[in-house]
Amino acid sequence: MSKKEKKRTLKSSVNINEKKPDTSNVAVTIIIAFYMLVECMPRLQLADQMGIHWLLISVLNGFSLIYLISNKSIIESDSFTRFFKNGISVVYTIFFLIAGLSLFVAINPIEGLVAYSRLFTTILSFVLIGILLINRLHLLKNIALIITIIATLQGFETVLQFYREVGKTPIDTLIYNLQGTSGNKNIFAAAFVIKIPFIIYCIFSREGFLKFFSIIGLSLCFLSLFLINARSAFIGVFLSLIILFATLAYLYWKDKKLKFFLVRFSFIVLAFALPFFISQQSLKNATQDKSSTYGTVASRIGGIAEQTSERSNIRLAYWKGSYELIKERPIIGVGYGNWKIYAPLYTKKLLNDDTFSKHPHNDFIEIGGETGVINALVFLSIFVIALILSIKIILGNGSFHTKIIAGITFACLTGYFIDAMFNFPAERPNIQILFALSLAILVANWLSTKQVHKKPLYSRFAKSLSIAMLVTCIGAVYVNAMVFKSSKVQVLTDNDFVVMGGVQNTPAKYTFEEVTAMYPKIPNIGENSETIGFKKARYLYAEKRYAEAIKLLDSVLYQSPNIGYSESLKSKIYADENKLDSAYKYGKIAFYAKPRYYQYYRTASYFAMVHKDVPEVEKLFKTYNSYRQDQASYSYYTQSLFYSNYDKSKLSKIVSDGLKKYPTDTIMLELKRFLH
């Protein structure tokens, strides 16, 4: 292809809606750039980094709304009415309203409000970005470049972290820590998946240095993805790339520019292949001892086909447990944001000790459980409509660039959809802002293909709606600010008790009154699934203010009744007060709430032993042993039976059987001498 032809190709691919540079274009670009830069916020001392991210996005929404309200060219145009009449906007609004209605049945409406404010923040970002981009699709070229620069820097940092620590840090720990500021490696990988189509757009729309910079950035993103080892991300990136390249090949072939496509495509193949082989060798060397959960890209992809049982894939167990819960309340659900409260009912049989999971690792299932199956289908229809609109644009009579945008945005949404099938992106702000951006571009792109008819302006409606959204946005900022403040305090109090637990007789750094003053009223459940009331009650326990601690625990039990933490603390309190019947009662409740928790098993078994309750000693061990078989529990079981005056001949056989499994166990060896 000659230089003139290349210039014509690029010109024809980027001039849709192109206007002369003006301050409004610069302002819109800056606003969207700030949205994209939120995830680049340095890590703070927080229980979860998403606290600051949600707060910043909600604040940005407020500033964006003020800009809209003060901009007559937008307020007095038909952008608002056109945007809200679109099918995706209508369905998204219906989803939002049904989710709001579900809060009325929520057992913990405060937690529902926290999640709902985040949903509002995401939808408002979608609306604002979409309205700002109507008639400004030429800005996508700069927006994609901003995303490319951010992704390149993140990819470089991830690759540098891996090769700096490999061989020094256990490989499982190292890969787990490849998460940027997202707080989760799977979510971090998903963000790369959604950004990659924008980077590819840069490769096709840029020339010279920026083109090669984009190719290097793409290589770093691919290498980061391969090193992170997230299987759901592999599925997402492969599927989105297939859709994107099939679309681009078709469009460039139809536009008689196939040679241009093949040249750019060859660069992308190189940017994919080289990182693939580098990561293969690096991961192969790092996992030679075969003890790692992870492996090479090829082995991880090959292992996907083996993830067909609950034993090999815990997500399947989550989904099965979720299905049982959804069957109980299929219409309205348990209330938006309340899934975490019911999750222990099925995760208690799946997760050991203090491990917890707040999500079923599938947003569609979680939405169905929280807001009803119908609303899950409503949310799913967003992707169906996006597919239909994308196909209509690509096969329609619109401009070449409009069709390219359709392919890019649907590839991004495909990456999001796959992540929503296997993870929980609805909670993570870095993924939600990318989802809002992709969806907004798709809607703005669709509207650019529609003929605009002169109609009476609805500036009064636009102003009224904008002001209503601003007022609601202020509420969302307040809620997100409280969550951010709580996240900072949670780190302080949780670390306080880690130190106290690790060093005997170490006093608490804070008093109950200080902690109570530090915590805001929202949220009432911490990031580690403990209620805030439970965290405060631990200070009362440390100060031996037992009656107050019991009263506080009872008052917050409804907030998370299925987790067992409060009952465990009450058991300790009653034991300190020598109220052994009550200590026994709550020790058993805590254990049966988390029957794979060894410490809970040991506590309950101890009090059963004190009460000489042989049937309960047997029942506790049988329950625990049905999930976990380990030396510590078996050894303590024999000890509990011995001090419960269990039949000596029967106990002798149990001890003998135990020593066959654990021949060096000192407790059972000692018991054997007593029993013979």
Image (tube, rainbow, N blue to C red):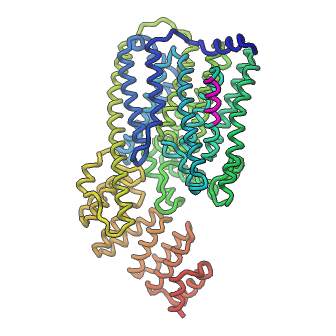
In the rendered structure, the answer to whether residue 541 lies left or right of residue 359 reads: left
Q: Position of residue 243 (x, y in %)?
A: 68, 30
Q: Position of residue 313 (x, y in %)?
A: 62, 53
At horizontal 58% and vertical 57% (from top left) the residue drawn is 170
Residue 645 lies in quadrant = bottom left
- In the image, the segment drawn in magenta is 209-219
Q: Position of residue 64 (x, y in %)?
A: 39, 23
Q: Identify the main secondary structure in magenta.
A: helix
In the foreground, 287 or 127: 287
At horizontal 37% and vertical 51% (from top left) the residue drawn is 491
Residue 240 lies in quadrant = top right
For the question of whether residue 101 can be seen, the reply is no
In the foreground, 470 or 196: 196
Q: Position of residue 44 (x, y in %)?
A: 40, 44
In the foreground, 144 or 194: 144
Residue extending furthest toward the top: 454
State yes or no: residue 211 in magenta.
Answer: yes
Identify the image quadrant of the C terminus. Answer: bottom right
Residue extending furthest toward the bottom: 676
User: Height in image: 13 above or below 295?
Assistant: above
